């Protein structure tokens, strides 16, 4: 047993505890110290995870947790994405309860990592709960009436889908005689197909709540709109990574007596279609982006549906997760840099007043569509290829049609910045402007442009 292999997780847990305790002793004016401590710990956690790159898989705690390429990917993505969230939301997240906020972010990040690395159903549900409970508090952080409503909706949805997840885990464990994935895969071979299918459906649906995909998507637009830009950036990015990697592991466990890939493909088609159609009607920027992330889950599920059926499906999933994370954070960084503009109409004149931020938004939005040569274009090319090779040509056609539909609302977001004169709304709230957001938005925008060609150069295609 290689305990040092858990160093990234230990760092996240220890930092969460220390930050929480420090907040009890530090005066409000010194709470900022916990911000820099948290940022440093996140970077150290990601740095320690980098040491596992290229190493053979390591099984920990009787093969209930595995450190492999997928786990390493989430150990890198989740802490780094959380660090970006803290930077773009430094003024929003900073408050008299600042240390508690960072502790919640750290615990949610740790839960996401555990969900992605779990190879045991009981560890999976433990990570699910650890990732979910802090999220409820984070959604209500702004302490508005809308935030309270969104928190209640998120909590109720989390309770419902959490119960479904637990029910599915209980059923699969009873049928397979074990909760460990390797043993479970063998035990389910002779189990009744109907009962096995019911168990997997419940677990998949539970994980889709965490990913923000259909049918567990209802909380996403409300939480995105009400929680504030920084928290919205976190909840539409980090939890998805762990949930989708966990879903990919489960597909590999399912016996041939059930067609789990077909179920995943159906949910993928529903997620991208519902998300895109709902986004067309939105006028609130954060709500539009929330629905956009629902549709992105559909594209991300395409390689999951062909795990074991197409070469490169796992690599396509991990690549798309990285490229989507960078792009989504770039778009939210632009929104954070322009506070006081909640609706599309409020973005009038932004192109004139903030050309660099407008450029970053254009790059980010067109990347989410899948416009070459941006990051998500390469990601979509990878996942479309994997799905086609895996025999899901119909899903590829549906995804292509949805990509065209998504262009309509992303263009609304872009064109709004070029209409009319600057309303001056941002200047009236200059005290709340996130100081680091403009620079981060521009840097991430540039990254979105170069990341795609870099992935191509790495030989993934």
Image (tube, rainbow, N blue to C red):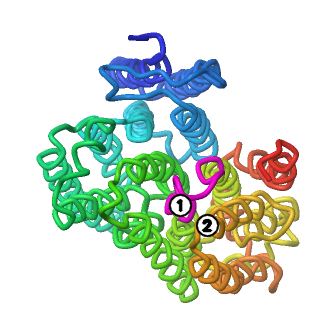
Residue that label 2 marks = 387
Please identify the quarter of the rendering in which residue 107 is found: top left
Q: Would residue 404 appear left or right of 253 to someone viewing this image?
A: right
Q: Work out how far the residue at label 2 is from the one at label 1, CA to CA, in angstroms.
A: 6 Å
Is residue 62 visible in this depiction of the protein?
yes
Q: Is residue 311 magenta?
A: yes
Q: Residue furthest front?
A: 190
Residue placed most toward the observer, 354 or 79:
79
> What range is drawn magenta here?
302-315
* Residue farthest to the left, as pictured: 174
Which disc is residue 306 wearing? Answer: 1
Please name the residue shown 59% across and 48% down the image.
314
Q: Residue at x 54, y 89 (%)?
A: 281
Eyeballing the image, is 370 above or below 181? below
Residue 86 pos. (x, y %): 57, 40
Q: Secondary structure at mark 1?
A: loop
The numbered disc on residue 411 is: none
Q: Give the mark nearest the N terminus, 2 or 1.
A: 1
Residue 241, relative to residue 419: is it above or below? above
Side (left or right) of 41 relative to 102: right
Q: Neighbour class for label 2 at 10 Å: few (<14), some, many (≥20)?
A: many
Q: Are the residues at dot 2 and dot 1 in contact (C-beta closer than 8 Å)? A: yes
């Amino acid at each position: 047993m290689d305990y040092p292999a858990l160093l990234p997780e230990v760092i996240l847990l220890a930092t969460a505890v220390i930050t929480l305790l420090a907040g009890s002793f530090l005066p409000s004016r010194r709470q900022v110290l916990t911000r820099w401590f948290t940022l440093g710990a996140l970077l150290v956690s990601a740095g320690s995870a980098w040491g596992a790159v290229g190493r053979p898989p390591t099984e920990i705690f009787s093969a209930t947790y595995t450190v492999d390429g997928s786990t390493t990917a989430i150990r890198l993505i989740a802490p780094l994405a959380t660090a970006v969230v803290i930077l773009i939301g430094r003024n929003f997240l900073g408050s008299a309860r600042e240390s508690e906020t960072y502790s919640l972010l750290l615990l949610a990040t740790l839960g996401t990592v555990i969900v992605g690395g779990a190879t045991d159903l009981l560890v999976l549900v433990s990570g699910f709960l650890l990732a979910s409970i802090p999220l409820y508090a984070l959604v209500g952080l702004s302490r508005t009436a809308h935030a309270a409503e969104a928190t209640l909706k998120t909590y109720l949805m989390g309770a419902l889908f959490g119960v479904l997840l637990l029910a599915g885990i209980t059923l699969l464990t009873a049928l397979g005689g074990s909760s460990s994935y390797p043993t479970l895969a063998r035990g389910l071979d002779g189990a009744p197909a109907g009962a096995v299918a019911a168990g997997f459906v419940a677990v998949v649906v539970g994980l889709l709540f965490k990913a923000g995909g259909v049918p567990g998507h209802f909380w996403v637009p409300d939480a995105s709109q009400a929680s504030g830009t920084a928290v919205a950036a976190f909840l539409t990015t980090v939890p998805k990574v762990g949930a989708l990697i966990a879903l990919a592991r489960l597909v590999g466990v399912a016996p041939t007596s059930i067609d789990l890939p077909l179920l995943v493909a159906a949910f993928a088609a529903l997620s991208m279609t519902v998300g895109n159609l709902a986004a067309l009607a939105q006028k609130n920027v954060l709500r539009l982006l929330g629905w956009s992330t629902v549709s992105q889950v559909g594209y991300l599920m395409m390689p999951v549906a062909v795990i074991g059926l197409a070469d490169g499906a796992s690599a396509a999933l991990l690549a798309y997760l990285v490229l989507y994370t960078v792009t989504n954070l770039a778009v939210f960084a632009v929104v954070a840099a322009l506070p006081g503009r909640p609706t599309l109409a409020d973005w009038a004149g932004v192109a004139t007043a903030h050309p660099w931020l407008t450029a970053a938004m254009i790059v980010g939005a067109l990347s989410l569509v899948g416009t070459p040569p941006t990051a998500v274009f390469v990601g979509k090319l990878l996942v479309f290829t994997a799905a086609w090779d895996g025999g899901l040509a119909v899903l590829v056609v549906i995804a292509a049609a949805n990509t065209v539909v998504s262009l309509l609302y992303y263009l609304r977001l872009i064109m709004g910045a070029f209409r009319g004169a600057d309303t001056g709304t941002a200047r009236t709230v200059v005290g709340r402007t996130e100081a680091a957001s403009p620079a981060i938005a521009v840097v991430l925008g540039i990254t979105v442009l170069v990341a795609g060609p870099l992935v191509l150069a790495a030989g993934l295609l």
